[in-house]
């Protein structure tokens, strides 16, 4: 199992969670952060570090956030716009640096408010 990052992170990306992650499994898109489910060790260190409460266990995703749980995995499993191959599990965000592109869901997402 893994942790996922929901809608509250879109256009916020505080990055406090990245500092707390002991395995460097939180990657940076253009508008949102994503947790690699193949690299996450389910420790939960990232969850309390998030100032906007965007992080939850994939087993306890808040109502209305299920599409972001699926989308989080999609970020790693399918090629992103402008990329020929999926990111997969490269062994840590330090290996890739900022990805700089998001999934279609996040790219087109408009926050309520």
Image (cartoon, rainbow, N blue to C red):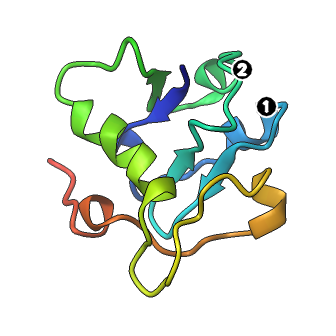
Q: Is residue 69 left or right of residue 41?
A: left
Q: Is disc 2 placed on a helix, strand or loop?
A: loop
> As rendered, which of 30 and 80 lies closer to the eye?
80
Furthest residue to the top? 60
Whole-Å distance between the Cαs marked 1 and 2? Answer: 6 Å
Callout 1–callout 2 Cβ contact below 8 Å = yes
Quadrant in the picture for residue 18? top right
Q: Is residue 11 left or right of residue 19?
A: left
Q: Which residue is mark 1?
A: 20
Q: Residues within 10 Å of mark 1 (few under 14, many from 20)?
A: some
Quadrant in the picture for residue 40? top right
Residue 45 is labelled as 2
The percent coordinates of residue 64 (x first, y second) are 17, 28
Residue at 65% x, 18% y is 42
Residue at 22% x, 60% y is 109
Q: Residues within 10 Å of mark 2 (few under 14, many from 20)?
A: some
Residue at 53% x, 26% y is 3
> As rendered, which of 38 and 21 lies closer to the eye?
38
Quadrant in the picture for residue 27? bottom right
The percent coordinates of residue 19 (x first, y second) are 80, 39
């Amino acid at each position: 199992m893994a942790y996922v990052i929901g809608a509250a992170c879109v256009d916020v990306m505080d990055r406090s969670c990245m500092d707390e992650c002991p395995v460097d499994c939180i990657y940076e898109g253009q508008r949102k952060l994503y947790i690699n489910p193949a690299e996450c060790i389910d420790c939960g260190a990232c969850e309390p570090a998030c100032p906007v409460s965007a992080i939850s266990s994939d087993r306890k995703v808040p109502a209305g956030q299920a599409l972001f749980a699926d989308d989080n995995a999609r970020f790693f499993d399918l090629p992103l716009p402008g990329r020929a191959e999926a990111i997969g599990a490269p062994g840590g965000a330090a290996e890739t640096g900022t990805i700089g592109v998001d999934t279609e869901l996040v790219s087109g997402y408009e926050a309520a408010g």
